[in-house]
Structure formats: structure tokens, C-alpha cells
Image (cartoon, rainbow, N blue to C red):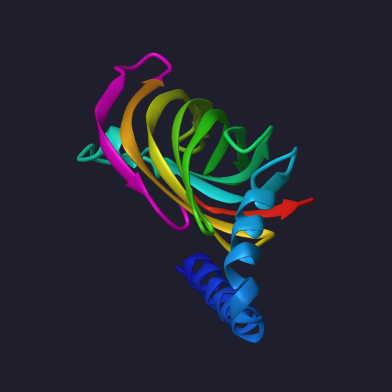
Amino acid sequence: MKKLSAVVLSLMLCVSMSFAARGGSSSSTSSSQKKSSSSSSSSNGSFGIGYSKANFNQAVSGVNGAPDLSFDEIAGRYWFDDKFAIDVQLGFGSGDATSRFLIGGKVVGNVLTINNLNIYFFGGLAFGSFTLKGNGRDQDASVFSINGGVGAEYYVLPCLSVLTEMGIRYISLKPDGGNSFDDFGVYADWLPQAGVRFYFK
């Protein structure tokens, strides 16, 4: 909850700065500036890095004693041009109760740009593993996910975007020496799941 509050607070601040900057510009150049901002933010080798969160808890929904299968991730997006990008996510951590690792990627195809908003299709997959520690032994498990759908990336500032995505996803969770859990269905991600990207020119 604290993470979400911090993200929302920082976004509110960025939105305020964005509107203040737009208000100060002349009306004759505002539309062209918006167009160039959105285009330059998603073209010619621009790279964005930020945060996302992968949530696989639906795979073990209703299972007693199921672990928390959400992974905090460092996320990067690289635009080759106005139409094509790749996403890479990396999450890991270790503690007294669990250790976890996740790597994933997406192919992104932009289909529509409206001012500061990009609408895109995507397809991706992720592989991960985690270890539950305690009760005298460790329990290892692996997770695999494949997904696809449609997303939106809004440039709050020319160098800062927020994302939301929805689509269909298949999740397979396989404990070592145990029965696997599978889930297939519709999902929707917004903040903080889909995440934030800060772009470098």
C-alpha cells in the first residue's frame, strides 16, 4: 500500500507539472509540441526504464496456504522506431521466508498515436522460480506465463509515461514433486502492475 501511495503521489506531481508547462505555452504551438513530444518519446532508439509488478496469484486462487506470487520488477522498453518496441522485465529477491526470480519479455507494436497517447498490441512470456523456506525443508517451484493483448502508454511528460494493459494470459505453476496449477483467462493491469517508464533520449 505504501508503494502504491508513493507512485500515485509522484504521478499527481508529474501531472501537475505537465499541465502547468502546457498552460504556459502559446495556443498556436501547443498542438505541434504535443505531437512532437509523443513521437520523439517513442521513436529513434529511445529507451525507458521503470517499475512494473507481475501478479500470478490467480494461478493458485483458493488454494489453502498458497504463497504470494507477485514479483516486483525492473522494466525496460526500447523503441526501435514509431511502430515497434521490445519490453524486458527482471524481478528477484531473497529473504528468510522466500527467494524468487523472474525474467520476461514482450514484443510491442504501436497501432495508433493520439497526442500523448500510444495504443499498442503486445505479446509476451515470462519464466520464474521461487523457493519457500521453513518447516525444516525448502520447497522449490517454477512458474511460466504467456500473454497477449492491447495496451496504452500515456506520456505525462515527454520523458515519463504510465501504462495500462489488458488481454488474455496462461499461467502454469509447477512445484517440484507436486501437482501443477494452471490458469487461463482475461486479466487487466494498471498502476503499479503495468508500470511507469522514464525515457532517456
- Residue 180 on the magenta span: yes
Q: Which residues are magenta?
A: 175-193
In the rendered view, would you say 176 is above or below 171? above
Q: Please, is residue 77 above or below residue 11 in the view?
A: above
Furthest toward the left, the residue is: 62
Q: Quadrant of residue 93?
A: top right
Query: To which quarter of the image does residue 167 belong?
Result: top left
Number of on-image labels: 0
- Residue at image point 64% right, 45% down: 42
Q: Nearer the viewer, residue 182 or 186?
A: 186
Residue lying at the far right of the rendered structure = 201
Q: Is residue 40 left or right of residue 12?
A: right
The part of the image, by quadrant, that contains residue 14 is bottom right
- The x, y position of residue 79, in whole percent, is 66, 37
**Residue drawn where x is 47% and y is 56% of the image:** 192
Q: Assess whether residue 22 is covered by the magenta stretch.
A: no
Q: Residue at x 38, y 38 (%)?
A: 150
In this orientation, which residue lies closer to the viewer: 62 or 196?
196
In the rendered image, residue 21, in percent from the top left (x then y), is placed at 65, 80
Q: Residue drawn 26% across and 27% down? A: 183
Q: Position of residue 85 (x, y in %)?
A: 61, 33
Q: Which residue reaches farthest front?
A: 28
Left or right of 9: which side holds 177?
left
Q: Using the image as rendered, state which of residue 46 and residue 101 is in the foreground.
A: 46
* Image: 173 above or below 62: above
Residue 117 on image: x %, y %: 49, 55
Image quadrant containing the N terminus = bottom left
